[in-house]
Image (cartoon, rainbow, N blue to C red):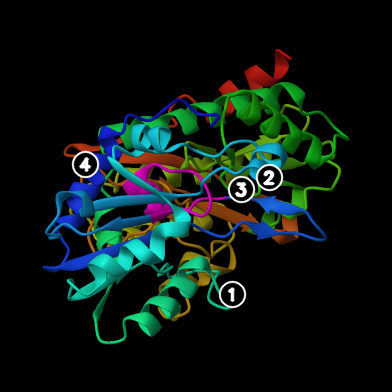
Amino acid sequence: MRYDKIPNTLFIKNRANFVAKMQPNTIAILTSNDVKHNNADDVMGFTQNNDLFYLSGIDQEDTILVLYPDAAKEENKAILFVTETNEQIKIWDGEKLSKTQATDISGIERVEWRHDFEKLLQYMAFEADGFYLGHNEHLKRVTKDQETQQDRLIKWCKQKYPLHDYYRAAKITRELRPIKSEQEIDLIQQAADISINGFLRVLQTIKPNIKEYELEAELTYNLVKSGATRHAFKPIVASGRNACALHYNTNDSICKDGDMVLLDFGVCYANYNSDTTRCIPVNGKFSKRQKEVYQAVLFCLKEGSKLLKPGVLPEEYEKKMANIVEQQLINLGLLKASEVAQQNPKNPLYKKYFMHSTAHHLGLDVHDVGLYAKPFAVGNVLTCEPGIYIPEEGVGCRLENDYLITENGNINLTQKMPIEIDEIELLMQKK
């Protein structure tokens, strides 16, 4: 693996917290994601199932974790199943994890080969009363129309053990994962630090007539060289009017003199993610209007981030953030105060220029698991990302930082990423 070894104490603690919330005499089975195929004999690469990684630290495909805390035999309380290396795998793909390596990474003493899973599970299954199985329960999940490894395991398990009780593993991990441990915060910080260096490279590279994808290449070079796993998501490098499309990421336009470029990007390091956004002038100098819009969004970020503290309900936070942005839109001359006072509260006028929410959990997923009906809590890591988009002026601006919620408010994990206009212009002039 590219990243530094994570102490297995993290995964040992995560498993202890998980099994403490299981029903008596139940077995939890977590499985890895599929390797996604492209065309012919090519694959897109592998991304581990984050619940499995959270509980084991194993970053390898075709892996299964079985937890049975009430098992009669101590050796059956936690079993990790991994792929056994054979000659064909060794020749074509290189060796997979040995049992000793899997134990070292996960802290699980008993490691078995994947092909023995069904046989060994049967020895325990009829002693248990039920199963916890994993599933993608994210509000915006994209796997709903695709059968996954988890789906196949659910189908197989219910067919083989139809009279057992079934429970949702995701309900437990959704409760545990939003509260980050010190080790997890350190990993997110490492991802954020790589993002900061990537942004500094872009500041030294950008110039009129450069292609958006050339700036994306700087971000990619930096994260690969830094030992990151991948981009947290496909980077958005949107110049001019492109910045008004929230998820624009073709990144194939020319950055024109006089335009501003919006960069929304993140780094995945050891499966933990950062998520940051900055806007910069192509020619190194913000125009008067660009400054006005930028300062308005920066004000929203500074004021809105103060609201990220324990006990605040996400819904109330978003309402207050919307009010802050709404006032800035009035100040910019985009909305009239008299019309805002008479607006339909169910269809507010600010939605024309600001149409998204601004805070989401961050961790093993960029939009990490967590219930938005619950108030923010100590240990949450959240984004703050207000924006103002003016298509008729060809200006789109969004600014985003990552914050750790503490007892006394929050800590900006991306504090070192330049954001003030004077600092950005000065750094761009020094290239």
Query: Mark 1 and mark 4: span between their CA atoms?
Result: 32 Å
- Nearer-the-camera pick, 222 or 300: 222
- For disc 4, the neighbor class at 10 Å (few under 14, some 14 to 19, many from 20) is some
The answer to whether residue 269 is left or right of residue 404 is: right
Residue occupying image coordinates x 42% and y 58%: 116
- Say which residue label 4 marks: 13
Amino acid at pointer 1: Gln
Tell me which numbered mark, 1 or 4, is placed earlier along the sequence: 4
Amino acid at pointer 2: Gln
- Say which residue label 3 marks: 397
Residue occupying image coordinates x 44% and y 80%: 155
Query: Mark 4 and mark 3: span between their CA atoms?
Result: 41 Å
The answer to whether residue 393 is left or right of residue 173 is: right
Amino acid at pointer 4: Lys
Query: Mark 2 and mark 4: span between their CA atoms?
Result: 36 Å
- Say which residue label 1 marks: 146
Q: Secondary structure at mark 1?
A: loop
Query: Mark 2 and mark 1: span between their CA atoms?
Result: 29 Å
What are the residue bounds of the magenta stretch? 47-64
Tell me which numbered mark, 2 or 4, is placed earlier along the sequence: 4
Query: Mark 3 and mark 2: span between their CA atoms?
Result: 52 Å
Q: Is residue 52 part of the magenta span, yes or no?
A: yes
Q: Which mark is residue 88?
A: 2
